Image (cartoon, grey):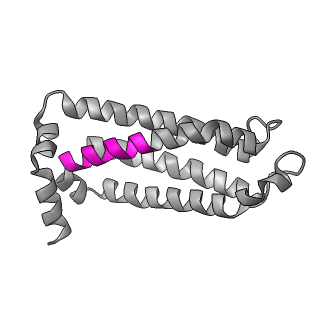
């Protein structure tokens, strides 16, 4: 089975077709998706700005992270669940869209960036959390995160209007 065949099959499932053809389901799910993005993105951006020493400089990164990560993860999980439903409803459109493909690539980069940050430089946060300047690698991770997520949002909006 090809990827396109899978997308056709998925889009024609009863629940996916129901989302696509309902006058209210797709817009409600899309609204929840957008709200979840906001719930995830604002705390993530604030954490990234803390890593860049632009925002909340006097607060330890570990404290900012502990405060914002539950919001980031909650928003992310809801965003993924609603995103899967939206994808299923328009799987063929997404398959044919360069914006969707770029969005997936950027999401993979976002995940890799977060994994790399949390598995390397953040593990030693106690060494630089309060007194030492934020390490360059942490600043790079924060800057990369901001740029990548702006790209994800832009590709999502482009997909919606393409």
The residue depicted at 32 percent of the width and 54 percent of the height is 100
Q: Establish if 120 lies above or below 11.
A: below
Left-right relation of 31 to 92: right
Residue 108 within the magenta-colored segment of the rendering: no
Residue 43 x %, y %: 59, 37
The residue depicted at 11 percent of the width and 58 percent of the height is 9
Q: Is residue 162 visible?
A: no
The residue depicted at 17 percent of the width and 55 percent of the height is 92
Residue 140 x %, y %: 68, 57
Of residues 72 and 139, the one nearer the viewer is 72
Residue 150 x %, y %: 50, 46
Of residues 32 and 109, the one nearer the viewer is 32
Left-right relation of 91 to 118: left
Quarter of the picture containing the N terminus is bottom left
Left-right relation of 4 to 160: left
Residue 45 x %, y %: 60, 40
Q: Is residue 4 visible?
A: yes
Would you say the magenta stretch is mainly helix, strand or loop? helix
Count of numbered tags: 0
Stretch in magenta: 77-89
Residue 84 within the magenta-colored segment of the rendering: yes
């Amino acid at each position: 089975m090809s990827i396109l065949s899978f997308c056709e099959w998925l889009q024609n499932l009863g629940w996916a077709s129901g989302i696509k053809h309902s006058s209210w389901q797709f817009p409600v799910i899309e609204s929840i998706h957008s709200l979840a993005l906001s719930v995830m993105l604002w705390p993530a951006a604030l954490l990234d700005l803390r890593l860049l020493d632009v925002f909340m400089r006097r607060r330890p990164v570990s404290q900012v992270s502990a405060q914002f990560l539950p919001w980031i993860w909650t928003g992310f999980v809801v965003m993924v669940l609603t995103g899967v439903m939206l994808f299923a409803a328009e799987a063929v459109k997404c398959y044919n869209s360069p914006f969707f493909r770029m969005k997936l690539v950027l999401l993979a980069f976002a995940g890799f960036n977060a994994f790399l940050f949390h598995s390397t430089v953040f593990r030693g946060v106690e060494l630089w959390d309060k007194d030492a300047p934020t390490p360059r690698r942490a600043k790079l991770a924060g800057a990369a995160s901001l740029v990548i997520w702006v790209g994800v949002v832009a590709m999502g909006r482009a997909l919606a209007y393409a």
